[in-house]
Amino acid sequence: MTRDRLWTLPNLLTLSRLPLAVLLFACIAQQWWFAGLATFGVAALTDWLDGLAARRLHQSSAIGRNLDPLIDKVLTGGAFIYLLPVESAGLMPWMVVVIVGRELLITGLRGIMESHGIRFGADQWGKLKMVLQCAVLVAILGLLAITPHVPEKVVSVLRRVQTALIYLMLAATIISGVQYLWRAARSRSMAASIAG
């Protein structure tokens, strides 16, 4: 287990998502939808590769467990914030508040738990939430990119699919947040019982 090294391959892949996030935000701001979709695709690929590298190279670490989800939250949360003024993205302010609020809460909670020596990496609910957030962003960016090039009837159907994905993602975001809170409460109470 690598505990104190920042400059490992998995962490470098994770850190590469920061400039990609800035590029994605610029693409959204300039309405370069195809470029934004491609940029987000590359960022999602690095997210998969850093986990693979950490497992294959045995370079899992507390730094990585905290850094990876933090940068994911910058990427996805920032993208949702930048997309909020885009009417056809189908997002409302309360949706973005739910997404960003949950991410801030769980990031802070993860830091507290790890500082007490309790491993608090992503679980299946957190991974499902991340997959759905990525699916929503791909759907929004993809639909914005193709809208001028396909019939309105097709766009209308795809927009309904996009809306369904958004609400499914919001449900997973809320459920995973509650589940993390429950997991943290159980971990702290178990640790207190052992210490007592």
Image (cartoon, grey):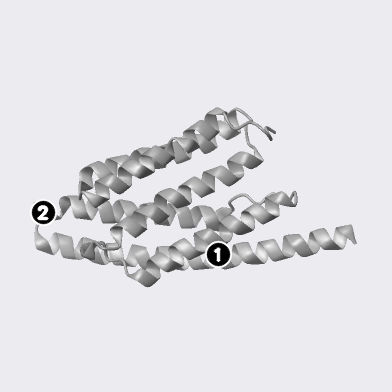
Q: Which residue is drawn at the image coordinates 58% and 68% (left, top)?
A: 178
Label 1: which residue?
Answer: 177
Q: Is residue 99 left or right of residue 125?
A: left
Of 18 and 124, which appears nearest the observer? 18
Q: Earlier in the sequence, mark 2 or mark 1?
A: 2
User: Extreme bottom residue here?
Assistant: 94
Q: Position of residue 76 (x, y in %)?
A: 40, 52
Q: Residue at x 20, y 54 (%)?
A: 144
Amino acid type at circle 1 is: Gly
Identity of the residue drawn at 67% across and 33% down: 4
In this rendering, position of residue 61 left or right of residue 171: right
| Amino acid type of the residue that numbered disc 2 sits on in the rendered structure | Pro
Locate residue 82: give its quadrant. bottom left
Residue at far right of view? 196
Please give the label number shown on residue 148. Answer: 2
Residue 29: x %, y % from top left: 25, 51
SS of the residue under disc 2:
helix
Q: Secondary structure at mark 1?
A: helix
Crowd around label 1: few <14 · some 14–19 · many ≥20 (10 Å): many
Check disc 2: other Cα within 10 Å, few if <14, some if 14-19, many if 20+: few
Would you identify the image quadrant in which residue 43 lies? top left
Q: Is residue 154 above or below residue 59?
A: below
Q: Is residue 136 visible?
A: no
